[in-house]
Structure formats: C-alpha cells, structure tokens
Amino acid sequence: MKARLIRFAFALHRWSGVVLGLLMFMWCLSGIVMIWQPEFPSVTLGSRDYRTEGLAPIALPEKVALPEVPADASISSARIEMMGSRAAISLAWDGGRGVFDLATGQKIEKIGEAEALDIAGAYVSRHRITGEPSIKNLSERDEFTVSGYFNSGRPYWQVRLNDSEKTMLYISSVTGDVRQRTTESLRWVSWFGAIPHWLYFTELRKDGPLWTQVIIWTSLAGCFLTVLGLFVGIRQFRRRHSTGKLSSPYRGAKLWHHMLGLVFGVLVLTWTFSGFASMNPWGWLESGPAVGEAFDRMTGKPVTWSAVRPAIETQTAALRVGEGDVVQLSLAQLEGQVFFVRRHSDGSRERVGADGSPAPFDEAARKRAADLLAGKPNAAQVELLNTEDDYYYRGSAASDFPIVRIIVPEADDTRFYLDPVSGELRFAADPGARGFRWLHLGLHRVDFFGWLRVRPLWDIVIVALMLGVTGVCGLGAYMGIRKLARGGKLDNQPTD
C-alpha cells in the first residue's frame, strides 16, 4: 500500500508538472523582469503624481455657479481643478456624483474629442512636452485600463502626446480625469513583466471575480506541485544500493531538475504561496472592522452640502483675490469639520479652514486625531516619521515622507499613517495588513530587513535566487513538453 501511494505521488507530480510547468516558468521569467520594473503603468509612479503635475492653475469664471445639491446631502468628496481650459468641481454625495462646470453649475455629461485634446494640451504645457496631442481612439478597455478601478470612467480617450517617449494618456469621457499614462518603454516592459506575471490579459482580467479565482487556484495548484516535488526529490536523494553513496538516480535534464529542486525548492514554494497570499483569499488577510470604526471616529459625522457650499464660496473668493498658483482645492474632513487642502503649482500643499484661514495639521491636531483613533485620551503614541518602518516603506504603502504615525496598543498595536498636511488616512497596519506585509510582501520580495532592501545588494541577492528558481521551473516545463511529445511515456527511468 505504501509503495502504491509513493508511485501515485510520483505520477501526480509528473502530470501536474505537465499542466502547470509552463505557467510557473512564465511567472519566473516575468518575475525577473519585474525586479527592475515592478510597477504597472500609472499616473502615479514612485513619489510623482503626473496627473496633478499636469494641472494648470485654477482660473475661475467671473461668477462662480455651484451645482444644485440637496442641502442635507452628506458630501463624501469635493475637488476643484481645471478641466483643460475650464474650471470644474467634482462632487460626490449620498445620492449622486458628477463633474460640474463652475461657469454654469451644470453637470458635464460627456467629454468629447475636442475637450479631451484641450485637457491633453494643458497636460503637455505643464509638463513642458514638445509634441502636439492627437486622438488615437475611444477605448472601452485595454490591458492598461482593464481593472475595476477604471470602470467609473469608461470609455477612455486614448490621446497620443507625440513626444520622444511616445506617451499615451487615457482621459475619461465621463469625468475628464487623466486616469492612466503609459510610455513606449513602460508598455513593452509590462508585456514581459506585470501583464504575464499577474495574468493581466484583457479577456481574463475584465471579469474580476473569475480572474481572482484563477489566480487563487493556480497558485494553490503550484504550491501542491512544489510540495510533491520536494517529497519526490528528498526521497530520491538517498543512498544507492549499487554504489552505497547518497546521490540522484537521474541523468540529463532530470538530474539538474532534481538537484536544483533540492536547493531552491523551498523558494519555489514560498514564492508561489506568497503569490497566493497576494489575493487575500477568502478574506484571510482582510483588515478588521476596528480600523473602519476608528476612521469614522476621526472623520466624524459626514458634512452636509449646507456646510460645504458656503465654505467653497469662501475658498473660490480667496482664489480670485490672489491664490493664482493653486492647481487643486480638495475637501478634507476631520471630526465633522470642513477643511480644504490647497495644492500649489510647485507641488506644495497647505490646509485651511472653512473660512480660508490657515489650519495646519499641527501637533495639537495630531494629538486630537490620535485620541479619536484610540477612542479615548492618551491611549496612542504619536510620531512624525521621516524614515521607513516595517510597514510604511518605499515599495509598499509609502508614497512620501514625512508621515504621521499613530500606534494604538490596545487595538492590537494597529498603526495609522496620516497625511501630515491634510490629516487624512493613508494606510492602516492592523493584524490583517501586517500579515499581508510578511506573508506576501516579505516572502514574495525577500523583503524582511531594511538593509536588505538597499540596492544593488537586493538586486544581487534576488537575481541569484530567481535564476535558481527559474532553472527548477524551466527544466520542469521542458520535461513536461517532452513527456507530451512522447505521448505521455516516461524516459530516463532510474534503475536503482
């Protein structure tokens, strides 16, 4: 019975390798590419926000007309900026949302071709790009706008900037936002890196639930194949009757697959498992309700249009008077109070109150936010962080420094990272998020220590490991193809 089970395990490993070998080999090759280009094309890359950098200073009409919204409507977001050559406000409330022309107060129902070129023209001017924008087409989706994040803005005007980088902007025909930016080099690298690695093929990725299940189950199958391979490899590396020495019974490609598998097999398993963990399967690493409850305490009861409208009128009056370099004005709520964040053309930001007076998120405001997040006074640790920690660092949640870190010991040491200007929550590291950090980011990127993250040390370590893992999977895929070519027959069977 035992011998029969062992033979079954061997056969199952061989046929699992036939089915999954090429997929795992593709994950390895695309993973090597992503060592140097880990990011998917986006309007925000690293610390840069290309969209806001492309906004012209707000130029308000002589008479500002705000949209008609019910006075008691709870406002979740409000943002004023230029849409090409006209000022517009983007509003969302409990009952509707839209982008409105500040000259008429009317909702902008559709962004046409001429308006898309106007928006692209402002972007080109602000980025000092030499090129004349032109429309490629109106696209419902492609591989760079396939995820659910883009659904609210479909379809998109694809606008060529005709610059040296062959930049393409994706401008929403619904909101006028520049939602995506690609360059020729990013497009090419993505097709060899992120797209195959994440299975971001349009026809699969456009069905979010299906794509999620495919990633989960193929990753699990890869883990199963690897565990079987480790069992087979360890069992076969034993003392031979013919020589009395510890050795492999194989030769050729099987020998290399066997020996590399013994050395790098555990890494194959950890990388496959951490890919599985990246999908947060079945809510396994989800944040608990405590984070949302703490955030609600900090933001307070949603502000209504009756409170936001006069505040916006005050802000727009101030802009007409002398704030000519403000490119964005956005609502920031804290403890039920109305604040606004002004972003200037040089990238600097400031928070002001509803009356337009300075209202910095200073030490007293941070202390108050900490008390609200903890649910009681003096129960949290507050620090202005200028360097990375284990959960907020370059390549993970971090986008910029400094950051306000608030640790609540009584809430499982949950860490809240707040924007130092607006006070808004950027990231929360509760037990679920911390588990994701170690089980996905830690294992998948070999990212456990700050010193190991330093380049080029990290590149050297990760390339060496990736070459070994790629060798294991590549040889497995090769043997699987050969097995299929022979009609499923075995070759090079060990005699001892």
Image (cartoon, helix red, strand yellow):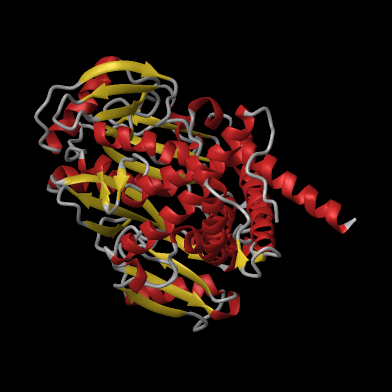
What x and y, as percent, mark residue 278?
55, 52
Which corner quadrant holds the N terminus? bottom right
**Relative to 276, residue 164 above or below:** above
What x and y, as percent, mark residue 377?
51, 81
Asked whether the viewer can see residue 61, the reply is yes
**Relative to 140, residue 224 above or below:** below
Quarter where residue 446 is shown: bottom left
Residue found farthest to the right: 1
What x and y, as percent, mark residue 434?
54, 67
**Relative to 469, residue 474 above or below:** above
Residue found farthest to the front: 242
Number of callouts in the render?
A: 0
Quarter where residue 214 is shown: top right
Closest to the observer: 432 or 264?
A: 264
**Residue under the image location 28 percent in, 59 percent down:** 351
What x and y, as percent, mark residue 328?
26, 45
Q: Is residue 380 left or right of residue 64?
A: right
Asked whether the viewer can see residue 297, the reply is no
Which corner quadrant holds the C terminus? bottom right
Q: Is residue 111 left or right of residue 212?
A: left
